Image (cartoon, rainbow, N blue to C red):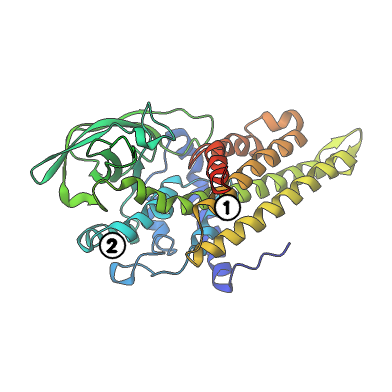
Amino acid sequence: MKRTIFSPEHDAFRETVREFLNREVAPRYDDWERLGYVEKDIYPKLAETGATTFGIPEEYGGAGDVGFKFNVVLAEELAGSGLQLNTYNITYNIILPYLMNLATDEQKARWLPKLAAGELVMAIAMTEPGTGSDLAGIRTSAVRDGDDYIVNGSKTFITGGSQADLTIVVTRTSPAPEENRRLGLSLLVVDTTDPGFAVGRRLDKIGLKSSDTCEISFTDVRVPSSDLLGEEGMAFAHLSQNLPRERLAIALGACATARAAIAHAAAYARDRQVFERPLSTFQNTKFVLAECLTELEAAQAMVDKAIELDEEHQLSAVDAAKCKLFATEMSGRVIDKCLQVHGGYGYILEYPIAKLYADARINRIFGGTSEVMKTIIAKDAGL
């Protein structure tokens, strides 16, 4: 089905992005996978394409509110190429909206120009070793001491944790009342060069090898009260406001990855000879790929509608949950079928489908598991 959400400007940006990825990212990507992280010098170069300026006001060196579709283009080109810039995704698709909605003018003046220039990498630290989806159980503490907060605790599964210059940390600044465990949490922006901030082990994942995922800890880290983001005690509400965008970003990436998997499977099937015939001539191969294409089109239509709603500031938490659930579950099924088309070669990392398979598995977990998405949807239905 023809997609109608993009303008000629988006199409032109897609060509710019594609050329940039081929020139600057693809040649270095194997090295980044071996390192376990994307080197930060890529982001000032990416800034030359304009990709680091979207959503940042012109007074801070940005392009202004140009809408989310330009971000969508970059995310689709990355996913479709089998590449990852997850620190970009975290910094610009997830954290930037927090800054735009919650930061003071003084904070914006400090952080936004550097973001627009690609000179600032950020992370967000929510998950703790004993706290996954239940954010109300967070124990990392921030105790007021004069004009500062003293932060103690630990976090895990932090994307970009070892590369970030600043990290937004969800902390408990006051005990939670029994009637509402979600109160008493606050967002603090921690400078990762501060004494007491430490990066622990880098976690060895089955996929997303270039994505830095690690443990971090805080031992009497002194954070100025001027680096409180938003209102004290209201972190849960602040986080909830920005989750729809994060889940939409995961959903659109899932569609792009599924599309790439189908393309790899179709190309392989045309070239692979089985019983002296191309694999693509067998009815089963045709039917499997036809099913995959149809599932993808359904999910893409849903994601495109959500992108339009996001541009209109109308994307609800429930809509985003439905979108993430459907798109990521679809992607898992499609990529699995496409790997099966490859037979034994699908299990060999030399073939792109194997890496897609490993990379895509996390989509049903991070940003809220599929089970959490179902809970949100069921609650909205009065169940």
Task: Give me the C-alpha separation between circle 1 and circle 2.
Answer: 28 Å
Residue labelled with disc 1? 252
Residue at screen point 48% across, 44% down: 28
- Residue 14 percent coordinates (x, y): 56, 63
- Residue 374 percent coordinates (x, y): 57, 41
In the foreground, 89 or 327: 327
Above-or-below relation of 215 to 233? above
Label 1 vs 2, first from the N-terminus? 2
Residue at screen point 26% across, 30% down: 153
Residue labelled with disc 2? 113
Q: Quadrant of the C terminus?
A: top right
In the foreground, 42 or 74: 74
- Residue 17 percent coordinates (x, y): 52, 60
Residue at screen point 35% across, 32% down: 137
Above-or-below relation of 273 to 381? above
- Residue 113: in sight, yes or no? yes
SS at mark 1? Answer: helix
Amino acid type at mark 2: Pro
Residue at screen point 31% across, 52% down: 120
Based on the displayed image, in which of its 4 quarters is residue 379 positioned? Answer: top right
Above-or-below relation of 151 to 62? above
